[in-house]
Image (cartoon, rainbow, N blue to C red):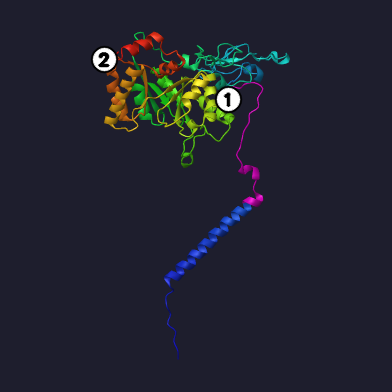
């Protein structure tokens, strides 16, 4: 007679069975609930709710609306309550939006039935903007703004070889005189705006006679330019130009190229110059290839000359057509005689500063360019105070560029520097 031995159920098997039953039950309950809501629920209740209050008169708890245009209160039929005091705003009092209206028609409830007159323009930050214009177009004329309503044509023109008095080169240049005819040294610190610490050091620690040049990739360019000008510095904008290894790096959006049309390059130039006002000219950023193509350089220099700007060559180019094209276009031009920190080593920098001194004594003027390396700024701070005792004057870069047009110094001053090279 066979016998069967009763054994306890496996704990693993029991746990697995109970887990499966629990999951099935939960799925069934949730599925049933979702199905019920889908069939019997209100689809509109699932969306966001927007409540709109319509009223003829303003109740005590009416929302405080922000008027944007003159006559807004009369148009909507109730007075604007003062948010701070809770009292009604007096009739005729309009919000201060920082805009001065010049001949513009103010809307009123009674004026809606009459023919609207054409607005004559508005003044924003001291500049007159007419219908069809934008504020940025007006600011391109310069920080001085438009001179009068209706006169929106830029006066940045050249008359022969004389820069018009209201050109950026004349208007934004730092005042400088050299009655004794001393040799002069001008310095441009370039590549600013990409490193905040070095940019602040150049603005705050170098004398205001040092010209500052800002990179085309600088963030907050307008802010940096304003800060530099408040510190007394002249400002340049760097114009990106096509190098020979153009394909190895990401090109700037407004780069001057050999293979595009002159109109395309002029449009890029206009967009770059529109980023900020307040500069006296531009300086090349790279451009070893572009500088050798006279047919590409000429239209750009003609445009810069028409705007009354100056152009500076940073001294890094082996060969360029810049000087000849600038002469043909009547463009104020300055070519650096020394790139001070091509090798950012103290001994090399000191040697290049000595070259500037020698060139200034031999030619009457010299121009040097530098990057805002800490070692460069430190050495410039030590070297600049020694120029006076050496009989050399520190001049802004605009003074050096004006020499190409015969406006930098008089013939007597040039003769004085030549006859007395020791200052």
Q: CA distance from mark 2 to mark 1?
A: 72 Å
**Mark 2 lies on residue:** 389
Of marks 2 and 1, the one in the foreground: 2
Q: Nearer the viewer, residue 27 or 304?
A: 304
Q: On screen, 49 above or below 406?
A: below
Res. 101 visible in picture? yes
How many numbered marks does the figure carry? 2
Report helix, strand or loop for mark 1: loop
Name which residue lies at 32% across and 17% down: 361
Q: Quick one: label 2 or label 1, which is nearer the N terminus?
A: 1
Query: Dividing the image into 4 quarters, which one contains the C terminus?
Result: top left
Q: Position of residue 52 (x, y in %)?
A: 63, 31
Name which residue lies at 48% across and 32% down: 292
Magenta residues, dominant SS class: loop
Q: On screen, 176 above or below 350?
A: above
**Mark 1 lies on residue:** 63
Contact flag, marks 2 and 1 (Cβ < 8 Å): no
Q: Position of residue 324 (x, y in %)?
A: 48, 24
- In the image, the segment drawn in magenta is 37-61
Q: Position of residue 355 (x, y in %)?
A: 31, 24
Q: On screen, 59 above or below 373?
A: above
Quadrant assignment, res 370: top left
Residue 195, labelled with which disc? none
């Amino acid at each position: 007679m066979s016998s069967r031995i009763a054994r306890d159920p496996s704990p693993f098997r029991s746990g697995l069975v109970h887990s499966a039953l629990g999951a099935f039950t939960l799925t069934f309950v949730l599925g049933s609930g979702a199905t019920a809501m889908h069939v019997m629920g209100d689809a509109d209740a699932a969306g966001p709710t927007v409540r709109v209050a319509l009223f003829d008169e303003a109740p005590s708890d009416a929302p405080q609306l922000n008027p944007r245009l003159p006559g807004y209160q009369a148009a909507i039929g109730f007075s604007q309550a003062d948010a701070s005091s809770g009292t009604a705003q007096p009739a005729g009092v309009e919000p201060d939006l920082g805009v001065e209206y010049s001949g513009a028609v103010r809307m009123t409830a009674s004026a809606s039935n009459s023919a609207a007159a054409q607005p004559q323009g508005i003044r924003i930050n001291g500049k007159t903007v007419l219908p069809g214009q934008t504020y940025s177009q007006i600011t391109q004329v310069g920080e001085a703004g438009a001179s009068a309503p209706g006169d929106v044509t830029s006066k940045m023109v050249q008359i022969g070889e004389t820069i018009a008095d209201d050109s950026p080169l004349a208007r934004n240049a730092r005042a400088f005189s050299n009655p004794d005819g001393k040799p002069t040294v001008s310095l441009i610190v370039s590549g600013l705006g990409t490193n905040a610490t070095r940019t602040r050091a150049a603005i705050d620690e170098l004398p205001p006679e040092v010209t500052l040049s800002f990179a085309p990739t600088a963030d907050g360019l307008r802010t940096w330019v304003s800060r530099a000008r408040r510190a007394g510095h002249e400002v340049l904008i760097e114009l990106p130009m096509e190098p020979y290894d153009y394909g190895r790096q990401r090109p700037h959006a407004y780069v001057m190229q050999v293979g595009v049309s002159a109109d395309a390059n002029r449009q890029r130039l206009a967009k770059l110059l529109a980023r900020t006002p307040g500069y006296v000219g531009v300086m090349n950023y790279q451009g070893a290839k572009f500088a050798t193509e006279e047919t590409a350089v000429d239209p750009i220099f003609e445009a810069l000359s028409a705007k009354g700007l100056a152009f500076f060559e940073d001294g890094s180019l082996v060969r360029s057509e810049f000087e000849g094209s600038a002469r043909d276009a009547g463009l104020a031009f300055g070519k650096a005689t020394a790139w001070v920190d091509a090798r950012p080593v103290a001994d090399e920098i000191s040697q290049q500063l000595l070259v500037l001194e020698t060139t200034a004594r031999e030619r009457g003027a010299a121009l040097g360019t530098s990057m805002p390396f800490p070692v460069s700024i430190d050495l410039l701070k030590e070297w600049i105070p020694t120029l006076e005792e050496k009989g050399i004057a520190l001049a802004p870069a605009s003074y050096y560029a004006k020499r190409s047009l015969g406006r930098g110094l008089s013939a007597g001053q040039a003769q004085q520097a030549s006859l007395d090279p020791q200052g």
